[in-house]
Amino acid sequence: MRDKILATPNFSFNYSESPEASAKHTADAMKLGQKETGVAERPAGSELFAVYSNPLREVLLYMNAHSNNFVADQICEQFGGPAELQRFLVTELKLLAEQVYLETCSGLEINRMTPRGISAVIRALADEVKRHGLKIEDVMPVATCDWGTLRRRLEGTPYQCAAVGKTGTLTTTDGGMSNLAGIAFTEDAGPFIYVILSQGNRIWEHKQTTDALLTELLAAHRPAPLAAPGQARRQLMPSANLRAEPQLYTGATGANGEGKLAAGGTEQEKESDDIEDEPEGRKAGRKAERKTARAKDRKAEAAKGRTAQTKNARGKAEPARKTASRRR
């Protein structure tokens, strides 16, 4: 619509679960002017623009490298949430039902799996990516050589850049946890699946001990690096892969007057914002932020409605539409 920006009820932007806030942030980010924003169950007016996602492979690599809980939960919800994931692990991967309990798909809050069960998941993941013509390092970060939570892991050891992995860190649940699981590559014996779970809130010490233990266990084998330690790190989710049609962007225009996409930040710039497996306290904070944002949205909409009704009574404007928010 010419005077409004409407998003679908499941629209999410900038790690927000509020579609109302996401619509507003999108309009601001794309400098679309002071337009009214809201949510609509069905399309109204004409489509303003469509954004095409990065390939799932790139999204998964970024999610695993930066331990992004929001992305993990959003993807998992598309397939039925934690209950469906737990069912898959038991029925498809044949894990023992009593050894699997999931409250979330990201690993936050209370979740239970054994090292043997996690090994089965890693093996199944390696088989699945191979079936699609990919390698495990296409969806998992390389220790030392990639940006993210592994950028300092195994650094200075023979296995830097010779292992992929996923961290799992909680600061208070179960007294604290610092876990690492993945695959290490050797020249003489092939790949090794490893899973090391450490309980307690001495997180830094656990990380150091885990790296030392893994290196010691593999000391008898020659590492097979996936990349050179000094090699430039991968840009895990290139912004150049994103397309928007029509070309509505941030003010810069080309020779034909069309807008151009503003390039996103590099992985180096994002490094300082990395958080490793967002602690449960931070998730509670995000919930509070979402609740506050929704309250502000409802208050703003109510104010708009009152203003529009007042103007209509004076014959100056028509009543504003109310926006329905979706409960998650």
Image (cartoon, rainbow, N blue to C red):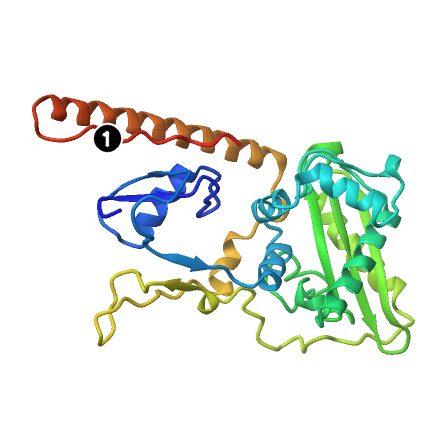
Q: Residue at x 44, y 48 (%)?
A: 14
| Viewer-closest of 42 and 136 | 42
> On screen, 103 above or below 2?
above
Q: Residue at x 68, y 76 (%)?
A: 227
> x%, y% of residue 216?
87, 63
Rendered view: 145 above or below 93: below
Q: Is residue 32 above or below residue 77?
A: below
94 left or right of 108 in image: right
Q: Label 1: how many residues lie within 10 Å, few (<14), some (14-19) or many (20+)?
A: some
Horizontal arrangement in the rendering, residue 241 relative to residue 298 (left or right): right
Q: Can you tell which quarter of the image residue 305 is in? A: top left
According to the picture, the residue beneath numbered tag 1 turns out to be: 320
Find numbered disc 1 in the image and state the secondary structure of the residue it sits on: loop
Residue 104: where, in percent of width, then height?
A: 67, 38
Q: Can residue 32 be seen from the camera position used here?
A: yes
Kindly identify the amino acid type of the residue bearing the numbered disc 1.
Answer: Ala
Q: Kindly indicate the quadrant of the structure image that contains residue 8.
A: top left
In the rendered view, tell whether residue 308 sits above or below residue 213: above
Residue 118 at what x, y percent from top left? Answer: 82, 50
Tally of marks: 1
User: Looking at the image, which residue is at 61% across and 42% down?
Assistant: 77
254 left or right, relative to 155: left
Q: Nearer the viewer, residue 36 or 185?
A: 36
* Residue occupying image coordinates x 76% and y 59%: 125
The spot of residue 24 in percent (x, y) is 33, 43
Residue 201 visible in rendering = no
